[in-house]
Image (tube, helix red, strand yellow):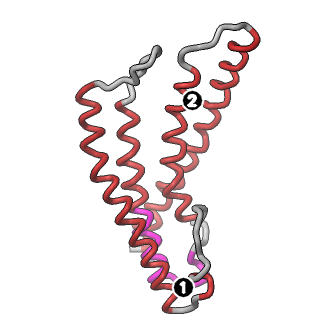
Amino acid sequence: MTQICSLITAINRVLFIAAAALIFAVVPMLLFEVVARYAFNAPTVWAMEASTLVFGPHFLLAGPYLLHLKGHVAVDIFSEKLHGGPKVAAEVFSYLVIAIFAGVFAVVSWPLAVNSYGMGETSFSAWNPPVWWLKFVVPFSFAMLFAQAFAETVRVLFLPAPEIGADA
């Protein structure tokens, strides 16, 4: 079981690194737009929209590994004072809530992505790029968040305390 959890975390780490690399595509796009607009008075129709389309996967694909790193905002006023069994129960409960949330979003967003693909959906802007592919990132990223919540639950329940939350 811990091997499966390590595999899930490793896949999410690769996705996290790929998502982080997307920012290196966004910066040149925005720089090009700024130079074109202000230096040459020739704004583009695509740069702002393209950067927005890249930001979606950037945040969605990074989320599952951030759960592993405990990088999400957490209100742990009460849980930080817990120890032993109550602390484990609180962590398992929080991962269960995350898993339910992610599972529902993955299931609900899948038909929307399939429908978008079937219609060949575009952005309806002046540039009008296809956006159906972006809709598949949503159920995929939430499925990976669900899997990571499962992996974190297994870590909390079955790994020794010093390894909980360790980078792996």
Which residue is drawn at the image coordinates 56% and 59% (left, top)? 66
Say what amino acid the circle numbered 2 marks.
Ser
Bin the neighbour count of mark 1 within 10 Å (Cα to Cα): few under 14, some 14-19, many 20 and up.
Answer: few
Structural distance between the alpha carbons of marks 2 and 1: 43 Å
For this orientation, the residue located farthest to the bottom is 84
Query: Residue visible at 40% across and 42% down?
Result: 137
> Against 10, is 115 above or below?
above
Residue 99 in magenta stretch? no
Indicate the position of residue 22 as horizontal and vertical percent values: 58, 37
Q: In the image, residue 149 lies at what x, y percent? A: 43, 67
- Horizontal placement of 40 versus 143: left or right? right
Please tell me whether residue 122 is drawn above or below residue 164 in the rendered image: above
In the rendered structure, which amino acid carries the disc numbered 1?
Answer: Pro
Residue 49 position within the rendered picture, expressed as x and y whole percent measured from the top left: 52, 25
Q: Which stretch is magenta?
A: 147-164
How many numbered discs sit on the rendered protein? Answer: 2
> Is residue 134 in sight in this rendering?
yes
The percent position of residue 120, horizontal first and vertical second, equals: 29, 24
Secondary structure of the residue carrying tag 1 is loop
Q: Which residue is mark 1?
A: 160
Residue nearest the observer in this picture, 43 or 63: 43
> Disc 2 designates what residue?
51
Residue at image coords 70%, 23% = 31
Q: Quadrant of residue 13?
A: bottom right
Which of the two labelled residues, at mark 2 and mark 1, occupies the earlier sequence position? Answer: 2
Q: On the image, which quarter does residue 26 sit in?
A: top right
Dot 2 crowding, Cα within 10 Å, few <14, some 14–19, many 20+:
some
Q: Quadrant of the C terminus?
A: bottom right
Residues at discs 2 and 1 in contact (Cβ within 8 Å) = no
Q: Is residue 34 left or right of residue 166?
A: right
Q: Secondary structure at mark 2?
A: helix
